[in-house]
Amino acid sequence: MADALDQFLLSERRLQTAIEEFMTSCSALQNLTLEDQTTDNDVVDHKLNQIRACRNPLILAEQKISQSRTLLNNALSQFPPPASMRRLPTELLSRVIRHTVSHWCRNFPFDNTSILLVLTRVCRRWRELVIRTPSLWSHVDLELVDYEDNPRAPELERLWLERAGDSLLHVHFQCGTNEFKYYTPRYVAFPQLVTMLVPHAGQIATLSFEGLGTRQIVEALTEIRLAQGSTNHITNLYIEGAAGTGLAPPGRIDPSPLAWPPSLFKGISELMINDLPDAQCPSLYQLLTILKHCPQLDSLRLHKMTIREDIGAISFPAVHLPRLRFLSLHDVREWGEKKILSFLHPGSTELHLEINVVEDSPLTLTAATNFISRFGITSLCLLPPVFWDQDDSQIIPYLPSLRSVHTLFLPLKNRGTSAINTLLDTVGCKSNETRDPPAEERPRRVRERYCQGYVLVEYAAVCYKIHVLDFQSNRPTLW
């Protein structure tokens, strides 16, 4: 046995060293006195007791955390994580939808249906959010055609009005037609839509008619006004008839004259009358009386219409519109333009005026230039007549009256580039010299000669602020 131990010790020197160190330690322990370490041992025991006292609450907390972790892991294993669209906070999602959905909701087709109805089918959360947002449903588009005898029931329109709640409504009537067939228009669906709208008349802020007969428009407006009573929230009224249909068959346009009750327009701040049959356009007296009922009018657009003469009328009332800031007489007959500009007195110092350049009417030209000078027009758009010859210089008579104009708009359509050439010719920007003036010189000469501000061209710009003559844009830009 001793021989075996000797062989083991010889073969394992590291173990032999450890044994020697252990024996040395044992000898030292035999000579140790514990009385010297009593104080230190008491401190250690006290600390150990404190640790033991804290250990039990920690064990209980760890057990509760472990149980909660188990429950969460089980729930996550049963349900997949939500999609990114569902993680978006409700308030932020509501803002995104309100900013991205067009006001013309039903006229924005998406997969052959309304974009709002598509949003209600994404998920339950989106559906509840969209339905609970009345402002999304406040623009109500009422569409119909004038050749159906059995139209569908307006259930979708009723749904729109219900979801709009008590919010202000913006109602748009739009009537389609078939220009390739000869028939008498039948507005069968129109009375149903008006009847459905009458209970909500007090909420209407914007009312728009497009493609309907003028008689139907006036009758519907009368019925809605009567339902409103003394409460009137309509501030924007847009009337666009069906006279402009190029292939309109006989019987499409009603030739009988029409009354225009001025009380229907009370409280309007933005008014547009466009594309009415000549026989049903308001007369000058009717139009001036209508405008007198709109003292807070700030935008007036009269487009593609005739202002009928009042046979036997001697005097007409002057109309003061102190808040008028936008006046457009686009394609109004020259006699009507002259009369409107003669009796209309705007009060705003920043009025934008749109008129057609006259062809053979010195009286209309005088009325236009006097209006520009008298009321200090700051923004002017000179629209060309229907036939504007390329060599025509009809813009020249207007130039001396543009001293107050800061911004001049000229269209390039209908060969209107001749107006720009004429404008540059009169200020010496185009001459027989071999070299044209530099680009930055042209706007300055135009400005010094005629205007106090810029000259903007409706699809091109001559602007002294940026010192360029730019013909690259193809859409009008209002600055």
Image (cartoon, rainbow, N blue to C red):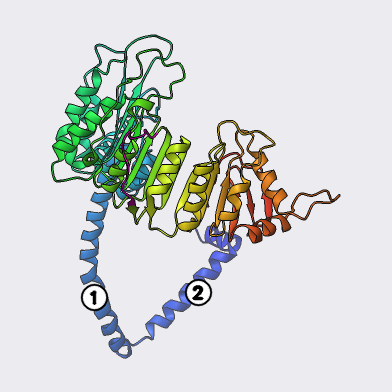
The residue mark sitting in front, 1 or 2, is 1
Q: For the point 60% across and 60% down, which residue is it?
A: 11
Rendered view: 417 above or below 150 = below
- Left or right: where does residue 404 sit relative to residue 211? right
Q: Main secondary structure of the magenta part?
A: loop
Visible in this render: residue 478?
no
The percent coordinates of residue 421 (x first, y second) are: 70, 44
Q: CA distance from mark 1 to mark 2?
A: 36 Å
State yes or no: residue 311 in magenta: yes
User: At 56% across and 63% down in the image, what residue appears?
Assistant: 9
With 185 as the anchor, is 411 left or right in this view? right
Identify the residue shown where x is 49% and y is 55%: 377
Q: Can the viewer see residue 397?
A: yes
Name the amino acid, label 2. Glu
Q: Which mark is residue 50?
A: 1
Numbered mark located on residue 21 in the image? 2
